[in-house]
C-alpha cells in the first residue's frame, strides 16, 4: 500500500536505517554523551552556521513542548495561528505540559504576520491576564504554505520589539527550505528565530526530532527542560544516528526535494481531472483539492488520504521521500477513471 495520507506513513530511509544499525555496536556512553551524538550535533551546527544548543527528542510533540517551555514563564501565553499543529493536533499537550495558554489567531493561509500578532497583544502588565511571550509558527504551515526568509525576519523583529520570542515548529522545515531554495542557515539562523523544532521523522527518520535553541540567553535551560519533560533518551545514540544520517551529504534536502517534486506532479495531475479544484497553492509536499463527494471514499480505497474539510469536500494529499512518480500516476489514473463514470 502507498498512502497519500501523511508523510508519517512513509518507510525509514535506508541510509537512516543503516546509521541506526551502525550505531548498534558495543557499549557507548548514555544520555547523549556518546560520539554519534557529538557528530550529529556538529553536523547540524554546520548546516545552521551556528553554535546553537541542540537536544534530540523522541517526537514532534515532545520537540514543541520542550522548545516552548525553554521560553515560557508560568504566567505567559503563546500566540499561534488557529490552524497551528500545537493548537489542533497535539491533544492539548502544549497547554497541559507547559501550563501556558495558547492564543490562536484566525489566518487566511495558516501564516501569522506582525499585524496579526499585534492585534492580540493587549492588557500588557495586567496581572489578571496572561502575558504574550512567544510567537509560534509552523514552517511549512498546515496548509502547505511557506514563510520566506524575509517574512520570518519581519516577524522575528516584530516579536523581539514586543519582548517576545519566535518559535518555529519545523516538522516539515526541510520541505520548506528545499522549496524556497535556501539553506537552513538562511531560513533559521539569519532570520532571528530563537528556538526551532527541527523535524526529521517526516523526512525519512524512524522517530527522532531535534530542539535547537539559537538564542544565547535561553540555551542553558534546554537540557534541564528535556530531562524534566521525559524526552531524554538513555540510549541517545539511536536518536542521534538518525539525524546524523539526514545531515550527512545533504540527505535531508534530497528527501525533501523529491517529496516536493512528487507533490507538484500530483497537483498537476489531479488538477486536470473533471470535478477537481486545487484549493491552495502547492508549495511544499502538500496538495489540497476539492473532489466530488461521491468519489472520496472510493478513492481512499485506492490510496488513503485525509478528508480535510468535510463541509466543502476538501482533501489533503501528502507526498513523502519514498513516493514514486509511478505511484502518483497510478493514483491520478485511478481518480480519472472514477470521476469519468
Image (cartoon, helix red, strand yellow):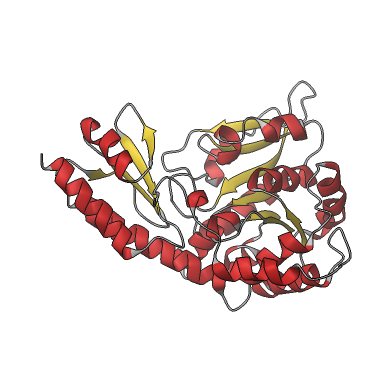
Tell me the quarter of the picture where residue 311 sits.
top left
Tell me the quarter of the picture where residue 61 sits.
top right
Residue at image location 69% in from the left, 42% down from the top: 134
Of residue 153 and residue 56, the one placed in the foreground of this image is 56
Q: Is residue 71 left or right of residue 91?
A: right
Q: Is residue 2 left or right of residue 168?
A: left
Residue at image location 87% in from the left, 55% down from the top: 220
From what the image shows, is residue 118 above or below residue 125?
A: below
Can residue 279 be seen here? The reply is no
From what the image shows, is residue 132 above or below residue 140?
A: above
Q: Which residue is at the far front?
A: 26
Residue at image location 48% in from the left, 33% down from the top: 106
Of residue 239 and residue 112, the one placed in the foreground of this image is 239
Q: Which residue is at the far left?
A: 341
- Image location (x, y in percent) of residue 128: 77, 20
- Image location (x, y in percent) of residue 63: 69, 48
Q: Quadrant of the C terminus?
A: top left
- Image location (x, y in percent) of residue 281: 34, 51
Q: Is residue 189 left or right of residue 31?
A: left
Q: Which residue is at the far bottom?
A: 249
Residue at image location 29% in from the left, 32% down from the top: 313
- Image location (x, y in percent) of residue 102: 65, 32
Total marks shown come to 0
Of residue 263 and residue 208, the one placed in the foreground of this image is 208
Can residue 301 be seen here? The reply is yes
Amino acid at each position: 500500500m502507498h498512502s497519500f495520507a501523511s508523510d508519517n506513513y512513509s518507510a525509514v530511509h535506508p541510509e537512516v536505517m543503516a546509521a541506526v544499525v551502525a550505531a548498534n555496536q558495543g557499549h557507548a556512553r548514555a544520555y547523549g554523551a556518546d560520539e554519534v551524538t557529538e557528530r550529529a550535533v556538529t553536523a547540524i551546527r554546520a548546516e545552521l552556521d551556528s553554535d546553537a544548543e541542540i537536544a534530540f527528542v523522541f517526537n514532534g510533540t515532545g520537540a514543541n513542548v520542550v522548545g516552548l517551555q525553554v521560553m515560557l514563564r508560568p504566567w505567559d501565553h503563546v500566540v499561534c495561528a488557529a490552524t497551528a499543529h500545537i493548537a489542533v493536533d497535539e491533544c492539548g499537550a502544549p497547554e497541559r505540559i507547559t501550563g501556558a495558554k495558547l492564543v490562536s489567531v484566525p489566518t487566511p493561509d495558516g501564516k501569522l504576520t506582525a499585524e496579526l500578532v499585534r492585534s492580540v497583544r493587549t492588557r500588557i502588565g495586567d496581572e489578571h491576564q496572561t502575558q504574550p511571550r512567544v510567537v509560534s509558527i509552523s514552517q511549512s504551515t498546515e496548509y502547505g504554505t511557506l514563510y520566506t526568509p524575509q517574512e520570518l525576519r519581519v516577524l522575528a523583529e516584530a516579536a523581539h520589539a514586543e519582548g517576545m520570542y519566535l518559535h518555529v515548529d519545523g516538522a516539515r522545515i526541510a520541505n520548506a527550505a528545499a522549496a524556497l531554495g535556501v539553506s537552513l542557515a538562511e531560513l533559521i539562523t539569519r532570520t532571528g528565530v530563537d528556538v526551532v523544532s527541527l523535524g526529521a521523522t517526516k523526512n525519512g527518520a524512524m522517530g527522532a526530532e531535534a530542539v535547537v535553541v539559537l538564542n544565547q540567553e535561553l540555551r542553558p535551560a534546554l537540557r534541564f527542560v528535556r530531562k524534566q519533560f521525559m524526552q531524554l533518551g538513555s540510549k541517545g545514540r539511536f536518536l542521534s544516528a538518525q539525524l546524523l544520517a539526514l545531515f550527512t551529504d545533504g540527505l535531508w534536502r534530497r528527501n525533501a526535494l523529491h517529496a516536493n517534486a512528487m507533490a507538484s506532479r500530483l497537483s498537476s495531475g489531479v488538477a486536470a481531472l473533471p470535478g477537481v479544484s486545487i484549493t491552495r497553492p502547492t508549495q511544499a509536499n502538500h496538495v489540497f483539492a476539492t473532489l466530488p463527494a461521491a468519489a472520496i471514499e472510493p478513492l481512499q480505497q485506492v490510496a488513503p488520504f485525509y478528508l480535510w474539510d468535510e463541509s466543502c469536500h476538501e482533501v489533503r494529499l501528502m507526498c513523502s521521500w519514498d513516493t514514486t512518480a509511478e505511484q502518483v500516476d497510478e493514483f491520478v489514473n485511478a481518480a480519472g477513471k472514477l470521476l469519468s463514470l
